[in-house]
Image (cartoon, rainbow, N blue to C red):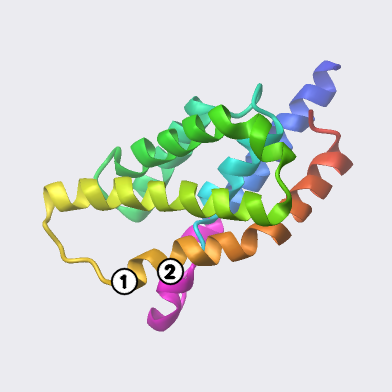
Amino acid sequence: MSLDQSNRSRLVIAFTFLVALVLAILPVPGWAQPFRPDWVSLVLIYWCMATPQRVGVGIGWTVGLILDVLYGSLLGEQALAKTLVAFLTLKLHLRMRMFPRWQQAVTVLVLVAVNHLVVLWIRDLVTHTPVRWSYWTSSVVSMLIWPWLFVILRDVRRRARVS
């Protein structure tokens, strides 16, 4: 792979994370907030699965830290959660590639729920805030969006020849 191709691959991956970060902080009405998919986790899962040699735990930590700053949350809260998601995805990426889309979607549900569980655990340690069932709807919506997002990101990866 040439240097130009390598730089283009980095830019494509960075651009997809930038889009996910923008979608994560885009304002939505209060009633729609619980239905917002975890865009950053979905993009992280895709890239860890598709290109584990390029995107891994370090990238997960970095985008999580950026999310912590954008959300104004406890520094390291999202970073720890995204690091765990990246680690688990890297451990499962060969199996996940072989799964049909619906099994990938169920795996994504579990990974995003683990992300939310870590964030919930940290927030409970710090603030002791009660949690409603609607907190978990984001995981379900992420699962439902996964098949379409997978196809879109796969197409982007193929067109940009990211490997």
Left/right of residue 22 with respect to residue 118 in the rendered view? right
Left/right of residue 65 with respect to residue 100 in the rendered view? left
Query: At numbered mark 1, what does the secondary structure look like: helix, strand or loop?
Result: helix
Find the residue positioned furthest to the top: 2
Q: Quadrant of the C terminus?
A: top right
Any mark on residue 133, and which? 1
Query: At numbered mark 2, what does the secondary structure look like: helix, strand or loop?
Result: helix
Mark 1 Cα-neighbour bin, 10 Å: few <14, some 14–19, many ≥20: few
Residue 57 x, y percent position in the rendering: 49, 27
Left/right of residue 33 with respect to residue 128 in the rendered view? right
Residue 5 x, y percent position in the rendering: 83, 25
- Which residue is at 57% across, 54% downward? 106
Q: Is residue 81 above or below residue 42?
A: above
Residue 24 lies within the magenta run: yes
- Going by the numbered disc 2, the residue's amino acid type is Thr
Query: Residue 149: in sight, yes or no?
Result: no
The residue closer to the viewer here, 106 or 37, is 106
Any mark on residue 61, and which? none
- Which residue is at 41% across, 72% downward? 34
Q: Is residue 158 above or below residue 145?
A: above
- Which residue is at 45% across, 78% downward? 32
Q: Are marks 1 and 2 in contact (CB under 8 Å)?
A: yes
Disc 2 target residue: 137
Mark 2 Cα-neighbour bin, 10 Å: few <14, some 14–19, many ≥20: some
- Which residue is at 23% across, 66% downward? 131
Query: Residue 40: in sight, yes or no?
Result: yes
Residue 143 x, y percent position in the rendering: 57, 60
Residue 147 x, y percent position in the rendering: 70, 58
- Give the spatial CA distance, label 1 vs label 2: 7 Å
Image: magenta residue range: 22-36
- Going by the numbered disc 1, the residue's amino acid type is Trp
